[in-house]
Amino acid sequence: MGLFAIVYGLFGAPGNKGECGKRTLVNLAAGTAPEWRLEKKPQAKISIALDDFVEHTRYGRATVAVVSTKANKDRPQLPPNARIGAFIPSGGVATGDRDLGFTPLARGRRAPDGASVDVNVCAKRPGDRGETKAGRYSGTVRVAGRSITGVEVPIEVTVKRDRRFAFIVAMFAALAGAVAAGANSRPADVSSEQVKKKPKIHDALWFMPLLIAVIAGTAAGVFIYVDDPTWGADLAGDLGKLIGASLAAATGGLTALAPVSRGARRTIANT
């Protein structure tokens, strides 16, 4: 059940396979006498964790405030028919000299009270997982409108390497750690004749610590993967962390459970 829970948690609910929609063109020129301007909070940022999903939509959002200009003292809020748009400028979202490989879809929408603008970005990673490398990609979203001085909001998209690869590495590392710890563990001091009396119980007590150690080691490796939004960007370093965590959890788990298993087997053998 433990291993099943890990597998389901990692692969069971991959995300939303919806569409981001179509890009719409809006005249974002503020004009010579803009009536409003948009302002963002210093910490405002749009963050999208794409993980390793392909053909799944992920969303991020931010809110920018609407401030009336000196030319407009009577209407501090945007009217319901305000023309607002958002887009990601040329250059897209990139890390160093490598871009994301596709451009997320950005939209700007007036809030119901007219005092702010909601900025929504939809990202859908197309094609094979290998086409977009793991890493942290950054850029800006430009939000503006008719008679509205615009603002740029930072955007960050994180991508990680294939979860199937990480899971397999974690499981094999955990198995290796459990087997190594088991090989160095003391025997149960139970004779073969005693084992023959209740073989299924002895087999279960021998096997259960190994299974639990493998599950614990796999879970530790999976946690390292899940906790790192850009796992695989530094493949050697990330693999080292994942394998180290899996080995430590598996060997520690077996070392802790082996004495309990030996004691239980001796008790059953002597009854």
Image: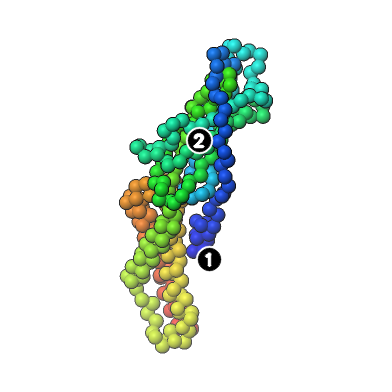
- Tell me which residue sits at (51%, 44%) in the image: 124
- Tell me which residue sits at (38%, 84%) in the image: 191
Q: Residues within 10 Å of mark 2 (few under 14, many from 20)?
A: many
Secondary structure of the residue carrying tag 2 is strand
Q: Please, what is the three-letter code of the amino acid marked with disc 1?
A: Met
Give whichever of 2, 139 is nearer the camera. 139
Circle 2 is placed at which residue position? 46
- Give the image location of residue 223, x and y in percent: 45, 53
The mark nearer the N terminus, 1 or 2, is 1
Distance of mark 1 from mark 2, alpha carbons? 37 Å
- Tell me which residue sits at (33%, 71%) in the image: 183
Secondary structure of the residue carrying tag 1 is loop
Q: By what rule are the colours in the image chosen? A: rainbow
- Tell me which residue sits at (46%, 75%) in the image: 205
Give whichever of 177, 126 is nearer the camera. 126
* Quadrant in which residue 85 is drawn: top right
Query: Do we see residue 264 in this rendering?
Result: no
Circle 1 is placed at which residue position? 1
- Give the image location of residue 225, x and y in percent: 43, 52
Query: Do we see residue 226 in this rendering?
Result: yes
Q: Residues within 10 Å of mark 1 (few under 14, many from 20)?
A: few
* Quadrant in which residue 194 is drawn: bottom left
- Give the image location of residue 212, x and y in percent: 45, 66
Q: Is residue 247 above or below residue 103?
A: below
